[in-house]
Amino acid sequence: MNDDTTGAGAVLALWNDVTPEMDAEYNAWHANEHVPERLTVPGMLWGRRYRRLSDDAAPRYLTIYGMRDARVVESEAYRLLLSQPTAMSARMRPHLCNLSRWVCDVRESQEFGESTHVAAWTFEEEKVARLRAAEHASTSSGLLLGRRSLDAVPLPWLRGDQAHAIEGSWFLTIGLPDEVMAASVPAPGAMLYRAL
């Protein structure tokens, strides 16, 4: 996966779980086929995979793709991948659950992608998101703030029982250094993830 997270005007954030019996197969497919395939789409700049650290109700996996702009997910190349899945992608789709997909315009990005651990929040209001970011300014190692596009085209294959609504209009993710992760409550209210 590309390590350069600069230049992204938009991000695609996907939260999901997978049926337990498919977890190992999911991770092999996702790391070795799915994410690399997405990165062949012109304008798809980088991808990051994360697994949830805590036992809270957040989906187990978070994937973030950096894109030139939000139109990348409307491009012919991207739509072709959705409509003509590989055999493994077609096999995996029914096992995905608790899936939420956000397309966001990036409003701020600072060295995001270099941390092993990230904290992710969603907010209704920009000022609340920026206040939370400011609270962690001295201890974070990278930041990504995006505004959700509410008119993004949904995944055509996603069934209603596979979806999980993550509410909000703003997506904030910050990198957490190891010493912050060692604290008893490293990022109150956050979904905590570790890079895969």
Image (cartoon, rainbow, N blue to C red):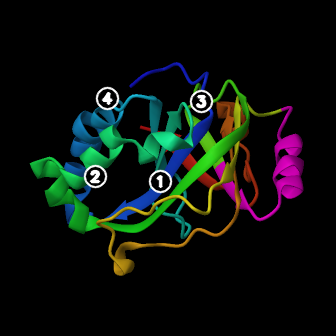
Graded by Cα atoms within 10 Å as few (under 14), some (14 to 19) or many (20 or more), the crowding at tag 1 reads: some
- Label whose residue precedes the other's in the sequence (3 or 1): 3
Q: Which amino acid does label 1 sit on?
A: Leu
Task: From the image, tell me which residue sits under label 2.
Answer: 82
> Does residue 136 lie above or below 36 as drawn?
below
- Label whose residue precedes the other's in the sequence (4 or 2): 4
Task: From the image, tell me which residue sits under label 3.
Answer: 8
Q: Nearer the viewer, residue 56 or 160?
A: 160
Graded by Cα atoms within 10 Å as few (under 14), some (14 to 19) or many (20 or more), the crowding at tag 2 reads: some
Task: From the image, tell me which residue sits under label 1.
Answer: 14
Q: What element carries label 2?
A: helix
Where is residue 133? Give x, y as percent: 82, 44
- Label whose residue precedes the other's in the sequence (1 or 4): 1
What's the magenta region? 120-138
> Any mark on residue 40, and which?
4
What is the spatial separation of the Cα atoms under label 2 and label 3, in whole angstroms? 22 Å
